[in-house]
Image: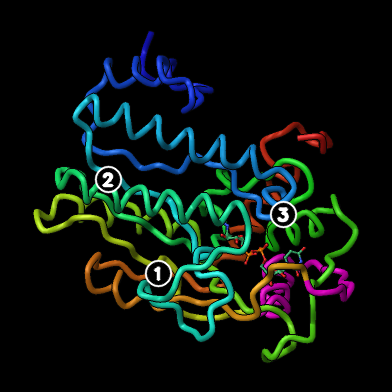
Amino acid sequence: MSVSQLVRQLDLRNKDALDKVFAKQKFDAVIHFAGLKAVGESVHKPLIYFDNNLIGTIILFQVMAAHGCKKLVFSSSATVYGWPKEVPCTEEFPLKTTNPYGRTKLIIEEMCRDLHGSDSDWKIILLRYFNPVGAHPSGFIGEDPRGIPNNLMPFVQQVAVGRLPALTVFGNDYKTCDGTGVRDFIHVVDLADGHIAALRKLDDPKIGCEVYNLGTGKGTSVLEMVKAFEKASGKKIPLSMGDRRPGDAEIVYASTNKAEKELNWKAKHDIHDMCRDQWNWASKNPYGYGKSGDSSK
Ligand code: WQD
């Protein structure tokens, strides 16, 4: 059986299956994206998040070590900053998580620091994603969350294609330009380029266990993002103003100086590129990867 057949639907918690993959193929490094990521869901089902995200990661690290693969890029998240007291967030900010999803990210970061501390052969880069949005410009690859989207832009996308009636804006009484939450939205293609830059950095003999923010360094409000998407799609997004969402921060955006200097990486796309590419994907794939009209996907 080929490696690609072995890894199809492989669950990281299945140690034997994972071991077979590493026995069959020598890997120079691993980029670890695998994890559940819905903040709201994690509050209601914490054990599923601890089991999937933490046990899966521990087994992955055990199998990597057993096969001498000790280079890792880990997909962490800006959620480890909690509600930052000031912005932009630098990598030195205090870490404080407000939900089980964020706690799994922080615990895995600490596991990585301990791993490197116990064995300096481990070379690890932790990437703290801010708010990934957009799609591949080809229109063939895009975001397709199962069920009702938790995040802003996939929700807006489903309103634009007629799958959902309106967007509820969670709070318009924040101390921001228009009262709505402010975030650092980053194009998924810039995010992907950040991973390539991190893989290259792992070859630097001086690297140990380092953390980098992947954002644009700019804050955009919910209403500004909706307006940009309406412009890109030509669709009107009906809105209703709702209460603040528990656990939401007011303003979060990144300082990207460290990634620019040490990874030679900087985001190239603005919110208009993100909305243009997201609409290109959504208009061609209104039901994501499912069949058209099959909203159960
Ligand atoms: C963005 C803004 C909401 C939905 C989370 C994780 C983070 C990352 C991205 C993984 C907020 C507002 C949203 C809606 C709204 N995940 N909003 N109506 O919470 O900033 O970050 O997802 O990498 O780690 O913490 O993203 O898209 O949920 O919210 O008004 O229907 O949009 O209040 O201000 P968030 P989000």
Q: Residue lying farthest top?
A: 1
Task: Indicate the quadrant where residue 66 lies.
Answer: top left
Q: Would residue 234 appear left or right of 281 to someone viewing this image?
A: right
* x then y, percent, for residue 15: 41, 20
Q: Earlier in the sequence, mark 1 or mark 2?
A: 2
Crowd rating for badge 1 (residues with CA inside 10 Å; few <14, some 14–19, many 20+): many
Residue drawn at 80 percent across, 66 percent down = 235
Q: Name the residue under label 3.
A: 40
Is residue 122 positioned above or below 201 on the image? above
Amino acid identity at mark 1 = Ala
Q: Which of marks 1 and 3 is in front?
A: 3
Residue span colored magenta: 221-244
Q: What element carries label 1?
A: loop
Q: Can you identify the residue that label 2 sits on? A: 115
Disc 2 beta carbon < 8 A from ligand 1?
no
- Rounded to the nearest angstrom, the CA distance separating label 1 from label 2 is 30 Å
**Residue drawn where x is 38% and y is 58% of the image:** 127
Give the number of the mark in front: 1 or 2.
Answer: 2
Say which residue label 1 marks: 267
Ligand 1 image-quadrant field: bottom right
Query: What x and y, as percent, mark residue 48?
Result: 64, 37
In the picture, residue 191 is in which quadrant? bottom left
**Labels 2 and 3: the sequence-earlier one:** 3
Pick out the residue farthest to the left: 205
